[in-house]
Amino acid sequence: MRRLLFVSRNLACPDFHGGCVYPYRVLEALSRHGFAVEYLWIPEKVSQRPFRLPFRPAFCRRVFVAGAFQIGPTYWQNPLQGRDLKRALNGWIQSPGDVVVLDYLWDAELLQGLPASTWILTHERMYRRSESYQAAGVVPDFKVLGEAEERRLLEAAKGLIAIQEEDASWMRQSFPDKPVVVVPPPFSVSAVEENNNRGDTVLFIGGRTAHNRGALEWLVGEVWPRVIARKPDARLRVYGTVDISGLGNAKGLDFRGAVEDLSRAYGENAIAVVPVRFGSGLKLKLLEAFAHALPVVATSVGAEGFAEVKAGTICPVSDDPEAYAQNILRLFNEPGFQDAVRQRQFEWLKVNADPALLGRRFADAIASYRT
């Protein structure tokens, strides 16, 4: 069993924002594939009082907290230890075959010189996200990064994990001597669920980010009036912590807020929409909807990552508000079209996001690279 240490500023969990859900699903798949997963959490600061983890991934053998020691399930601040993370990483490594995976690229300097197989789970190309926000005239709500700086940080790892194929292509061109493996969020789906006649309901889900707010503004302002004019009883249900201020009380809008059970939210609706207009990376909500057997209508940015999805051959994709509304209405009105979309989404997941497949892919990438 190969040892793997995951290093992150976030505590991965299955039902929060994409930055936590994605690594949770990847680590769960790797654990099932035979990796002995351990976790080093780097919190912003360590409580001076004894504390327990708000969530502990069940598949992790051990969870270390930077600047703390553990007695049973309780952690205690350790002022003598401090936060010498490079020393802690070197102390964890037992052989060159051990694997260290860094979540995001911000702490990439920690990987330099480590005598192990080191990888960065990239999530997205941060410079592309910056460019997309700036092109949309939106002030970034994250640290802006240029392409040259991103290359410099990624250089520290011996291998790179891309969330989607478009990112992987750029990485292969930028780092021809590094192994690059594509690992989208894993989803296990055994069969297409039956359509339970969920009515004329549409699901939008998103966290409190500028690209989700922009998507919702466009959906409510440009698309939904066209839908409701032809389907007066349709409902648009908005879930999550996305900013809804100033969006008014248009007919058919239903703001549900944050929910604990996302599966139930997906199960209550007939269609999912991913109307993202700017941003980068693979949208977790797209694959979540695929996995819950909801036919999806996306924009080209919402479908970004894999050419066949972006081309509209898996689910309907449009950036025009009238065409977007027509796709929603067609899914409402044509059960055969809805079933065909759901079937294509299911087949795509089986080929691209099966946990066993992705676990094996990462294991093969490690095996093919000699530390």
Image: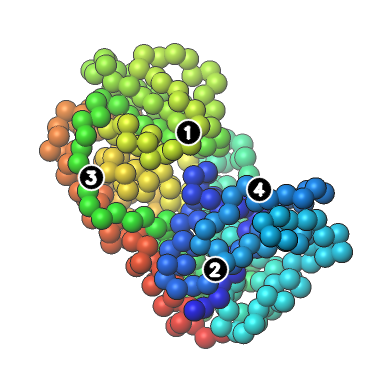
Residue at (20, 37) in percent of width and height:
195
Q: Amino acid at mark 4?
A: Lys
Q: Amino acid at mark 3?
A: Glu
Q: Residue 174 vs residue 304: left or right?
A: right
Q: Nearer the viewer, residue 57 or 327?
A: 57
Q: Visible in this render: residue 70?
A: yes
Where residue 142 appears, as percent x and y from the top left, is 63, 44
Which label sits in the foreground, 4 or 1? 1
Q: Which residue is mark 1?
A: 259
Q: Secondary structure at mark 3?
A: loop
Q: Which residue is mark 2?
A: 37
Q: Which residue is mark 3?
A: 193
Crowdedness near tag 4: few (<14), some (14–19) or many (≥20) residues, C-alpha within 10 Å: few
Badge 3 or badge 4: first in the primary sequence: 4
**Callout 3–callout 1 Cβ contact below 8 Å:** no
Q: Nearer the viewer, residue 274 or 100?
A: 100
Q: Which residue is mark 4?
A: 143
Residue at (44, 13) in percent of width and height:
249
Badge 4 or badge 1: first in the primary sequence: 4
Q: CA distance from mark 3 to mark 1?
A: 22 Å
Q: CA distance from mark 4 to mark 2?
A: 29 Å
Q: Secondary structure at mark 4?
A: loop
**Quarter of the image that includes the C terminus:** bottom right
Badge 1 or badge 2: first in the primary sequence: 2
**Callout 4–callout 1 Cβ contact below 8 Å:** no
Badge 3 or badge 2: first in the primary sequence: 2
Q: Secondary structure at mark 1?
A: loop
Where residue 51 appears, as percent x and y from the top left, is 73, 49
